[in-house]
Amino acid sequence: MKEFLRMENMSKKFGEVYANREINLSIMEGEVHTLLGENGAGKSTLMNILTGLYQPTGGSIYLHGKKVKIDSPSKAVKLGIGMVHQHFMLVEALTVFENIILGITKDKSIFIKKDAIKNEILELADRYGLDIEIDKAITEISVGAQQRVEILKALYRGAELLILDEPTAALTDIEVEGLFKIIRKLTAENKSVIFISHKMREVLEISDRITILRTGQTIKTLTKDKTEEAELANLMIGKELVSSEYKKVMKTKENILSLEQVSFNKTSKHNGISEISLNVGKGEILGIAGVDGNGQSQLAQIVTGVIAPDSGNVILNTNKIAKFAPIDFINSNVSHIPEDRNKMGLIGNMSVRENLILKSLNKKRISAGKGLYLKRKAIALYAKEMKEKYDIRCASIDMELRNLSGGNQQKIVLARELEEEPKLLVAVHPTRGLDIGATKYVHDKMIDSRDKGCGILLISADFDEVLKLSDRIAVMFEGQVVGVYSGENPPINEISLAMSGKAK
Amino acid sequence: MKLKNTLIKILVPILSVICSFLVGAIMITFIGGNPADAYKFLFRGAFGSTANIGETIVKSVPLIFTGLAATFAYKCGVFNLGAEGQFTMGAVTSIWISTVVTGITGIPLLILSLTGGIIAGGIWGAIPGILKITRGLNEIIVSIMLNYVAVLFMGYLYSSPLREGSVPQTAAVAVKLGRIMNGTRVHAGIIIALIIAVGIYYFLFFTAGGFKLRAVGLNQTAARFNGYSVKKFILLSFIISGAIAGLGGSVELHGTQFRLMSGFGAGYGFDGVAIALIGQLNPIGTVLVAYLFAVLRAGATTMQVGSGMPTSVVDIIQALIIVFAVAGSAFTNLPKTRQFLSNMLSKQNRKEKEEWKQC
């Protein structure tokens, strides 16, 4: 096999921090090469360099052995590098055809030769088994079909190397099989694929070689046949995987939160929920498993008062909620670790100290005279205490929050949300983007709170996290709860099936 | 880190002023003047005598008010470009009170009149706020449009119902703000302006309300998730911003102009926005920049008379300050510049790194 592309000593610095440090990667013609790494290992940065979105701080890229400089996305396309992003870059109102030809000027005529181009596209689609409906609008086709459109789009632009960023995250099992068939056809035609995924089973099924990234560096490149799941996991994490086991508890009789037939934006499969009934007991963790975008966000926002359901009852601690406003939930001691900490939880341009007291401004220890005077000294003292207690690593409590790492930002959210001894904690992707150490810390804190009697609704796209923490597991699919299982010895196969919509 | 940011925030306006004067000097040379001469007369005009110093202060008063109005709204993340209209409505209300209210005079009437200005400005500011939070209308467009409504309404008043004599202007107000400096026109308005500035500073940085308002301005979604009523704060910021501008109009009327006529308050709203931006959205910075603008205005005429340079040179310098300040702020936000600046302040940097190691 000939080498298609090689990246040598690629480095990318953001400020003082290396996102990529002397990474070496070589892609052969016709191979599926997987990039494996935890969140924040530097995969996205590397791919953004390859597609011309970022300029590297150092290092060089060779294409067919010749040194190239990829200084813009259009240059990357010209060199035959195509990417299918995790979140598709399609214009929803346009048709499949229009999306594919968007931005291409193959001939100089001012008219678009529709029929000729359409035939060309359909031929291409046929060759790789990409089943598409060319005249349908993007909104009318399924997620799997949208992905095929993205792949076709890249191929039509002459891609020789296709980067697939977490392509299976939003797909059902059958769709994943379809995707793998397409990938195999591509490699049979000598095209290369960079596959990015966390799912070991898939990685081992489809890859020829696997490169593991950790903290921005290449750790090792392995051939599939010569490795196994445990080795990959250990390389990825950097130490022997110590699975800390948490004791599971039985559901208590008393509920802190009950949902009765709650619906919101019912017709949408991905942005709504449909007649959900759930209970979270006191001192219990109810985990919600499911592929991202099956209504979990809406569920979290309803039980924290950010949005109001269209119908159904939400009962919080025996009170039926009539008015949905975040402040009322906060006052009833509901804490929220929101899914997007930067957008929803924290204020990047405010200091660490200010972010810590966002919710407790009117407390006596923070302010006097109904908030007319903020007790600066007391606040500084409190912030320093939190910094110690939650191990928030920052130069000073006056540092702007955006300069902290994701893990430390999350610890600030945690400090703020857990310090008030909540009765209900709604935690959405609580460890997304965190390294293993911070993750364990967050998990320990959540178990601590549970043991103190706090009811926890855990929503996570990380199935392992749900399995590890939950006392009971509910599965969401297309806005519905399709099954509730015990957290003690959970029937993993059954749950996986339920997550892909095939519950019995 | 905090010190460094503060330093940059102070440096940017100062450097912009210096650069503007330098470019201004080049320009003066090109049109055949002597920059040193022109600037000498400019500063003589602003500081040459007690009367001149006083006049500069007088000119700064309305600019402080509209600058603070813009600052306040910006802090909540909304744009109030309607300060001119609110300023005008404040003055209009004061004139109206002065005309229709009988039976009280002196200080009580003054207080009533100023309060009227505050309320009118607040109402005028509330309109774009209400339309934004209930209907999602763009506050920039609504507030600018309301400027025209206010100015034309004022025109109607001084040329028809409230007209006095043959010239299109209203009668003078019944009660005036007291002079506070002998031999000058400086009136108590400057004290009111400074109190308001300090008050806003305290509110923004020392109270829970100000904290929340800034939080809403910096990240609405996070503010909402953390239980703040975003809409309430947006409306509040509009009302207070408008009230400050309205009080400014009222003060200007009672302290300097005494009557409404064509051109009253013209341009103050937009100058206020520029002043707020150059002042780095800090109430105290706003006061200082407003004073600087007043210096330029007070000196412009003397410069024209003394050196023959047209007053428009000063307008250009003023515009250059805005350009440099905005460019400077954007420039300091570039990662490369930040890197460079932190290297420049390497002593500070080393200390920071040590702190990093410690934790």
Image (cartoon, coloured by chain):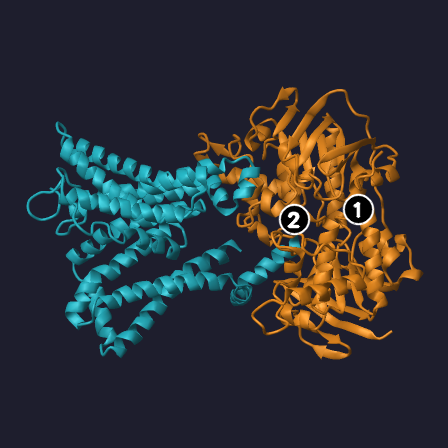
Chain colours: A orange, B cyan
Q: Mark 2 points at which residue?
A: A139
Disc 2 with disc 1 on a shared chain: yes
Q: Which chain carries label 1?
A: A
User: For this view, does B11 lie left or right of residue A240?
Assistant: left
Q: What element carries label 2?
A: helix
Identified by mark 1, the residue type is: Thr
Q: Where is residue A118 in the image (x, y as percent from the top left)?
A: 69, 63
**Marks 2 and 1, the one that precedes in the sequence:** 2
Mark 1 residue element:
loop
Q: Which residue carries the number 1 mark?
A: A172
- Up-down relation of residue B303 to residue B52 (above or below): below
Q: Residue at x 75, y 38 (%)?
A: A477
Check disc 2 and give the amino acid type. Thr
Locate residue B335: give its quadrant. bottom right
Where's the N terminus of chain A, which quadrant?
A: bottom right
Mark 1: few, some, or many residues within 10 Å (few <14, many ≥20)?
some
B53 and A436: which is toward the camera: A436
- Look at the image and tell me whether residue B208 can be seen: no
| Vertical relation: A9 (above or below) A216 | below
Residue at 75% in and 54% down: A166
- Answer left or right for A215 relative to A177: left
Residue B86 in percent (x, y) is at 29, 43
Q: Position of residue B61 (x, y in %)?
A: 25, 49
Whole-percent x, y for residue A11 in the image: 70, 68
Looking at the picture, does residue A249 appear above or below residue A155? Answer: above
- Tell me if B273 is positioned left or right of A278 in this view: left
Q: How many numbered marks does the figure carry?
A: 2
Q: Which residue is the extreme one toward the front? A: A115
Instruction: Compare residues A485 and B311 and report the one nearer the observer.
Output: A485
Picture quadrant of residue A91: bottom right
The answer to whether residue A61 is seen in the rendering is yes
Q: Name the chain under label 2.
A: A
